[in-house]
Amino acid sequence: MRSKDNFAGRSSERSWLVGILKNKIIDYYRKLDRETSFTDLEFLEDEYSHKFVEQGFWNHHLGPHEWRPEADEVMPKGEFWQTMRDCLSKLPQRVADVFMLCEMDNMPSKEICKTLSISESNLWVMLHRARMALRECLLAKVPQ
């Protein structure tokens, strides 16, 4: 109704309002497409926070530790990269893209957001979840 003065009268009011509604619906689905749902990260069970929390408090002893020895000492480089590709393939495509652009291509976050049409906060959530999922996947595949 705020834009009723813009109505030129070349069509019925009904078709003008239906056009506005159609554009609002399109905007809604465009926004959904830009924002990634994380329900398909089935192996990222609530970001594995239960592994690090004990009696409602963060327990540093349960938290992630630095990896020792170095990755190329644990697995040959070719095997590591094949494992990495396997783990990346389990991520939703947009989450994998965010990880690759940020961590492998060293693209600035603002450029990633512009390229993928996502908000900066969504970028950081996606990156966090990708890291957690990849860490979990890689840990499961590292020989003990």
Image (cartoon, rainbow, N blue to C red):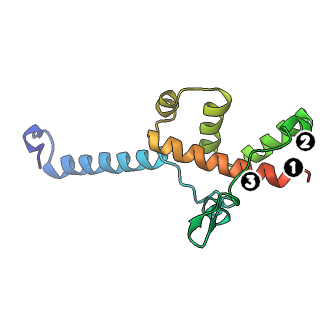
Are the residues tagged 1 and 2 within 8 Å (C-beta)? yes
* Residue nearest the observer in this picture, 36 or 30: 36
Q: Callout 2, which amino acid?
A: Val
Name which of mark 1 and mark 2 comes first in the sequence.
2
Residue at the disc numbered 3: 136
C-alpha distance separating marks 1 and 2? 7 Å
Image quarter of residue 98: top right
Q: Quadrant of residue 68?
A: top right
- Residue type at the position of mark 1: Val
Q: Which mark is residue 74?
A: 2
Residue type, label 3: Glu
| x then y, percent, for residue 119 | 44, 40
Please tell me whether mark 2 sits on a helix, a strand or a loop.
helix
Q: Could you tell me if residue 128 is visible in this image? A: yes
Q: Which residue is mark 1?
A: 142
Kindly check if marks 1 and 3 are in contact, taking CB atoms under 8 A apart as contact. no
At x 73%, y 45%, the residue is 89
SS at badge 1? loop
Q: Is residue 14 above or below residue 46?
A: above
> First in sequence: mark 3 or mark 2?
2
Is residue 75 visible in the rendered image? The answer is: no
**Residue appearing at x 36%, y 45% in the figure:** 27
Whole-angstrom CA distance, mark 3 to mark 2, is 16 Å
* Earlier sequence position, callout 1 versus callout 3: 3
Check disc 2: other Cα within 10 Å, few if <14, some if 14-19, many if 20+: some
Q: Position of residue 16 (x, y in %)?
A: 19, 46
